[in-house]
Image (spheres, rainbow, N blue to C red):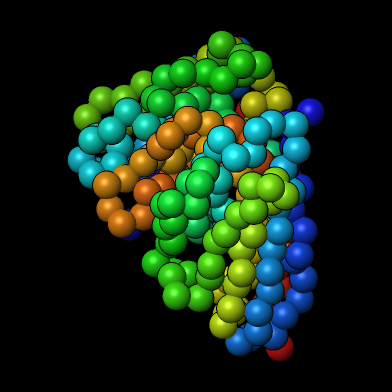
Amino acid sequence: QSALTQPASVSGSPGQSITISCTGTSSDVGGYNYVSWYQQHPGKAPKLMIYDVSNRPSGVSNRFSGSKSGNTASLTISGLQAEDEADYYCSSYTSSSTPYVFGTGTKVTVL
Amino acid sequence: EVQLVESGGGLVKPGGSLRLSCAASGFTFSSYSMNWVRQAPGKGLEWVSSISSSSSYIYYADSVKGRFTISRDNAKNSLYLQMNSLRAEDTAVYYCARVFLILSGMDVWGQGTTVTVSS
């Protein structure tokens, strides 16, 4: 199972909106609404930000939103803040013999 | 407080074995599927293994199949990963994580335990 494809880096100024893409296939992202997004600060454990494509867990800011079109899922961060600078990973359920696959990861830089 | 705490990491020689543990507290452990996820130094997240709430369903990444064994003891609120025939490429921080909903995201993560495979 190959990793889902994410851009290596995305940057934006405070207050702006940025979008991170996550491209898979019809066997994972495109076939199921089980895409999740994780935020990871250096030296810390990942934190769930979005589950099932567009749902936010309790306590996650509404500046974070998720969507999906075909085989590509997206995470949008609006009103970018300095604390949003981190690595972001998507993940999807997959119909292959291994149920989960992560994306390659995207480093978000706040300029 | 909902919490996962990993232990058991360390330095091991290639070909050696190690057993990781993950102690759960603050929630009904027996109701949730659990995962092990690892992250090699400077690299991304890699799913390693999954186990359903009653241990009926178990899955492994191809990279560890035949070498790693996941298990759980619901009476002890604990998750385990027995790692045999370790290789240099198994060097990573290993996280245990709770599956939020069936097939869904992982909403609770431990702090991670570091495994280093080196001679």
- Along the line of sight, which residue is nearer the eye, A81 or A64? A64
Horizontally, is B109 left or right of A25 in the view? right
Horizontally, is A44 left or right of A12 in the view? right
The residue sitting at 64% across, 39% down in the picture is: B29
Taking A99 as reference, is A49 above or below it? above
The residue sitting at 43% across, 70% down in the picture is: B65
The quarter of the displayed image where residue A84 is located: top right
Q: Position of residue B115 (x, y in %)?
A: 70, 68
The quarter of the displayed image where residue A88 is located: top right
The residue sitting at 50% across, 76% down in the picture is: B67
Which residue reaches farthest front?
Answer: B75
Q: Is residue A1 visible?
A: yes
Q: Position of residue A11 (x, y in %)?
A: 54, 31
Horizontally, is A28 left or right of A36 in the view? left
Q: Position of residue A83 (x, y in %)?
A: 71, 25
Taking B69 as reference, is B95 above or below it? above
Q: Position of residue B19 (x, y in %)?
A: 68, 69
Taking B55 as reference, is A25 above or below it? above
Horizontally, is B16 left or right of B9 in the view? left
- Along the line of sight, which residue is nearer the eye, B30 or A65? B30
- Along the line of sight, which residue is nearer the eye, B101 or B12? B101
The residue sitting at 44% across, 56% down in the picture is: B58
Q: Is residue A19 visible?
A: no
Please identify the quadrant where the C terminus of chain B is shown. bottom right
The quarter of the displayed image where residue A13 is located: top right
Taking A91 as reference, is B42 above or below it? below
Q: How many marks overall?
A: 0
Please identify the quadrant where the N terminus of chain B is shown. top right
